[in-house]
Image (tube, rainbow, N blue to C red):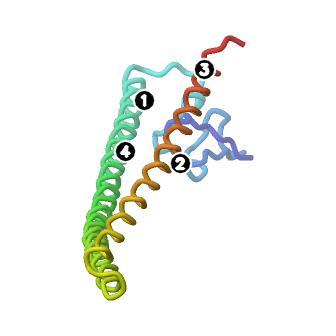
Amino acid sequence: MRVKNRTGWSPEKEDTYSPDAPADAISNGPAGTDDGNASFEDSGHEQGADSQNSRQHSTVEIIQGLISSGREYAQIETERQKLRIAIIAAAMRYSALLGGVAIFLLLGILLALPIGAIWILSPYVGPLVATLIVFMSGIILVLLLLMLVRAKIRKVMRNLLSQSANRSEPQ
């Protein structure tokens, strides 16, 4: 018959019971051997101060081990988060660089577009009128976009104000 006497603080060997051994001789290994790691339930005899100190010492060691394991885990987690931030920062730098190149090319295209439009319209209406047509088309396009932005902002503000009014009403 196997009897398990565990303290719950650390992994211990399975305690075994031999029918040939006396009733109070529960061993922590093969039958008949005792390595001195007896648990609280091993015997009904009172134990001396030395045995109590060794139990406290082992509990303190276990707690210190847990603390050191927690510190190691925290250091590893900190390093992992630093690596994660470094990867994100590298991706952001790369994205910013590509975004800058894209904006530069967009400005070049926006400059070339009216020049090309003027060049194409010039033989039909003359250079001055072609310039005025492209300029006025650009102004009208900008005004239409600004009106769309204004309508969108008003819609968002209206929604925000109605939500804040609904939250402040008592129910």
Residue wearing tag 3: 165
Amino acid beneath label 3? Ala
Number of the label disc, if any, that sits on residue 69:
4
- Which residue is at a point 40% across and 37% down the rendered structure image? 62
Q: Nearer the viewer, residue 39 or 97?
A: 97
- First in sequence, mark 1 or 3: give its number: 1
Please report whichever mark, 4 or 1, sits nearer to the chain's N-terminal start: 1
Disc 2 versus disc 4: nearer the observer: 4
Q: Which residue is mark 2?
A: 33
Mark 1 or 3, closer to the camera: 3
Where residue 120 sits in the image (x, y, percent)?
A: 34, 86
Above or below, 70 against 136 in this view is above
Q: Quadrant of the C terminus?
A: top right
Residue located 36% across and 86% down the image? 124
Q: Nearer the viewer, residue 76 or 67?
A: 76
Q: Report helix, strand or loop for mark 2.
A: loop
The number of discs equals: 4
Choose mark 4 or mark 1, whichever is in front: 4
Secondary structure under badge 1?
Answer: helix
Q: How far is mark 1 from mark 3, CA to CA?
A: 65 Å
> Label 1 crowding class (10 Å Cα cut-off): few <14, some 14-19, many 20+?
some
Mark closest to the chain's N terminus, 2 or 4: 2
Residue at 68% x, 41% y: name it.
3
Circles 1 and 3 in contact, beta carbons < 8 Å: no
Label 4: how many Cα within 10 Å (few below 14, some 14–19, many 20+): few
Measure the alpha-carbon separation of dots 4 and 1: 21 Å
The residue pinned by badge 1 equals 55
- At label 4, which amino acid type do we have? Ser
Camera-near label (2 vs 3) is: 3
Q: How many other residues sit within 10 Å of disc 2, few (<14), some (14-19) or many (≥20)?
A: few
- For the residue marked with disc 1, what is the amino acid? Arg
